[in-house]
Amino acid sequence: MHRIATGAGGRFEFPDDAPALFALYRDLYDCTAGAVSPLVGRALEQWGYDSAYSLRAASVIDPVPRWDDAIAWDGSALETVGPVVVDVGAAGKGYLVDLVGGVLADAGIHSFTIDASGDIVHRGGRALRVALEDPRDARKAIGVATLGDGALCASATTRRAWPGAHHMIDAITGLPTDAVIATWAAAPTGLVADGLATALFFADPAGLADRFDFEWVRMLRSGEVQSSAGFDGEVFA
Amino acid sequence: MTHRRTAAIALGGLSLAATLAGCAPTPAESAGGSTGADAATGGSTASEPYADGDYTATGEYQTPGGTESIEVEVTLAGDAIDTVTVTGNATDSTAQRYQGEFIDGIAAEVEGVDIDELAVDKVAGSSLTSDGFNAAIEQIKADALA
């Protein structure tokens, strides 16, 4: 990743676990008209979310390059035309939870819950009741989801925030997004649920539902909460 | 495929209105959207009572998939709306979804409930921040006070 970000363009081979992640990213990119992109990395750094957590915005924030202008993913390698900061934060942790679940399954463990703070994968056993944390007050919940076999991923702009910015950057505008303040997505895998939790900040849920089989809840800046018809749980009205 | 909803209450119409605002590419166009056959409003003034009867209007709007329309039937009785029927005529599958099954639950300004009072197994919120992030935030606060 460091070489991709600092060196000249080129062709970079990725390990076997990368294709699923890049494929999902391309889907999300297409579904959100480019708002969800792995290419927000540079802008995110410039807003202050860098490896040193400077948390101070640079005077100039570069526009986020368009996917087809900057990179090409051929299924196993990333080709770049120049230095780009690839950020897989939108779905990477959910995917990691899937990989950990795979290790457990390989070891013959088929009933487990992995809670990676924001990303939960639950297999086997009875369904869990999961509180949907109020993004405005972590002591409170705005609803409760029932999680059977699958993943529930949450995201909010209120916690990973610093003066003037937060970590949810719209790749089209290059700005921190502000219409939606919290999202929850339930899907078969952590990869997809995590990615969709990010996409729900930027896209109409109905458009995402054309591509993905998932249920969702999200809270707007106004405090209004929206949810899908099939959401398994309740929202406190 | 046609979605037909007979709304006995005003809410059905409201949620559909929200649907259209949500999927129209430019809200300004949709707000000015008197593009359809406007049967019901011709020539009436505010003081004039509306004649009882059935009124039908079709509203059209532009989507990336082409022009879509909805049909609204209103029955007026005694100067009040008696029934409203909204029929989505979407031809494009995306528009069908928007018209038929967009946001199915909307709760205005939800008030949080104390998690301590709920019987739950887990809490789903945004990722906790790392120590490095927290330390950086504390530094910024300190700088701001200095």
Image (cartoon, rainbow, N blue to C red):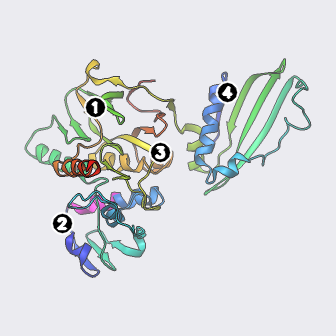
Q: Amino acid at mark 1?
A: Gly
Q: Is residue B134 left or right of residue A181?
A: left
Tell me what residue is drawn at x 78 percent, y 49 percent: B35
The residue mark sitting in front, 4 or 3, is: 3
Q: Amino acid at mark 2?
A: Pro
Residue neighbourhood size for the residue with mark 1, other residues' Cα within 10 Å, grouped as few (<14), some (14–19), many (≥20): some
Q: Amino acid at mark 3?
A: Pro
Q: Is residue A23 magenta?
A: yes
**Could you tell me which secondary element the residue under label 4 belongs to?**
strand
Q: Which residue is mark 3?
A: A205
Picture quarter with the N terminus of chain B = top right
Q: Chain of mark 2?
A: A
B134 over B17 or under it: above or below? below
Residue neighbourhood size for the residue with mark 3, other residues' Cα within 10 Å, grouped as few (<14), some (14–19), many (≥20): many
State the mark number for residue B44: none
Task: State how far apart marks 2 and 3 are (Cα).
Answer: 32 Å
Task: State how far apart marks 1 and 2 are (Cα).
Answer: 31 Å
Tell me what residue is drawn at x 58 percent, y 45 percent: B22
The residue mark sitting in front, 3 or 1, is: 3
Regarding residue B68, the answer to whether it shows in the image is no
Q: Which residue is mark 4?
A: B6
Chain-order first, disc 1 or disc 2:
2
State the mark number for residue A15: 2
User: What segment carries the magenta color?
Assistant: A17-24
Q: Quadrant of residue A77?
A: bottom left
B40 over A50 or under it: above or below? above
What type of secondary structure mainly makes up the magenta span? Answer: helix
Q: Quadrant of residue A87?
A: bottom left
B46 or B5, nearer to the observer:
B46
Q: Quadrant of residue A85?
A: bottom left
- Position in image of residue B91 (x %, y %): 64, 49
Q: Which residue is mark 1?
A: A148
